[in-house]
Image (cartoon, helix red, strand yellow):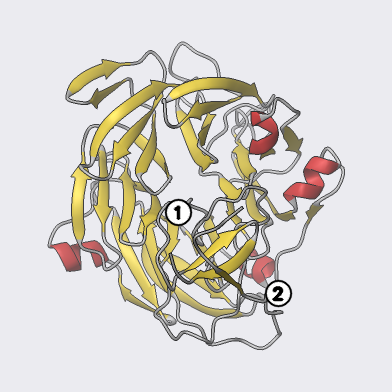
Amino acid sequence: MKHNYKFLTIMIAMFVSQVVICQEKIILLNEGLWQADNGRISYFENGKIVSNQWFRDINGTKIGDTPDDIIQVNESLIAIAVNWSNIIQFISPDGKAVAATEDVPNNRKLASDGKYVYVSSFGHECMVNGSMVEFKKGFVAKIDINNFKVVAACEVGYEPEGIAYYNGYLFVANTGGYAFQEDHDYESTVSIIDADRMKVINTIDTKQINLYGKMSQSGKYLCINSAGDYYDVSAATVIFDCEAALNGKKCCTSLEFAATYNCTSADGNFYAIGSRYSYYTGEYTFNYITINPETVMNTDGADGVTHILPGTVVQDIQKMSMPYGIYVNPYSGYIYATDAGSFVGAGSLYQWSPTGVLLGKHKVYINPAHFLALKPDSGNDGCPDIIATGSREDTAIYNLHGIRVLSPVIGNIYIQKGKKFIYLNN
């Protein structure tokens, strides 16, 4: 098969115990207080907080009420779901506002294929191509980044939350999270959508209810949190194989641990901080785990989970008042977590080296929760070489955030079949 490009494979560097100096550029969404319209963005670079109101500093206006997710769409565009303001805010990597879409009410989580942005919504109506479309349950909207308009939408389950793009399909975790106040039960399903036609082609029952929160992706694998019902049904984790689901094979395995806050690790595993809350006791219980998704699937959950995170990460998180997020920079392997504290005052951002050496604690804003790493500047040779998205069986090209790239840029680093390479020429 003739290719019109050449690859230069980069050898994977072994992590060493000493701290490596590496440029870090992190965008952190602070949710603020729900309905208080005080969400903020913190910007962290090279070991310090540059600003805790970065969006306002650059654009002269606030970001809105409860920013709930952030993704890199392509090299020049970032999307932010601002839930209670009913806005999808688009910015450039330098923070400048590019556009905003207000046609997706009660938006939740985001995914992208580089050409479109896909948004899950708890709402029941959406403006599609200029006309209002109504849904009984929740839906997923498709936004064209050429004009930032919703061009299609389809109904999924009640209160859909996490969403991921894989090989032309969307995988949407349904929560049914309003079951306590509306006339329906908790959901336990993952809807599979043909992203081109925006049609549901299959619905997989995971046997675990309330699939709540952002889910992490490592190649074909997803890590999905099941929050339970906070009474008698305990929280759990679902590991989901997208490829198996598309081929009609057994595609999910449940673990007895929670994955309330989860992320993809540098080697393609999942890190998870699990938080179980009980209305009976009014107390939280936590677990801290690393999940190898391939092993979990191969052993049907009998193996592949360890109660270990690098270095002192677990010990440091256990000192927090209320853990609220975890993230690994896909460009460097540096580890981050946040502490919401009392939920009403300033939270904290923690930073560790890839081997788990605590590098610092920084004051941010209220309820810091959602992360995005920006690509380091050129010549940043101090960074360790990382594979962030795990092994891939397809021949598509992905950026370091796991987003498929249709038009790679010469000189940029991408991933194909689990290996990093530099795109050289057309």
Name the residue carrying label 1.
405
Q: Report the residue at 42% width, 82% height from top.
A: 46
Q: Is residue 33 visible?
A: no
Measured from the top left, where is residue 378 in percent x and y?
41, 81
Measured from the top left, where is residue 33 in percent x and y?
32, 48
Picture layout, residue 308 above or below residue 172: below
Under mark 1, the amino acid is Val
Q: Report the residue at 23% width, 32% height from top.
A: 103
Q: Is residue 290 left or right of residue 404?
A: right
Residue 217, numbered circle? none
Under mark 2, the amino acid is Gly
Name the residue carrying label 2.
311
Which residue is nearer to you in this view: 389 or 61?
389
Q: Report the residue at 65% width, 69% height from top.
A: 313
- Do the residues bearing badges 1 and 2 touch, measured as CB atoms within 8 Å? no
Disc 1 on helix, strand or loop?
Answer: loop
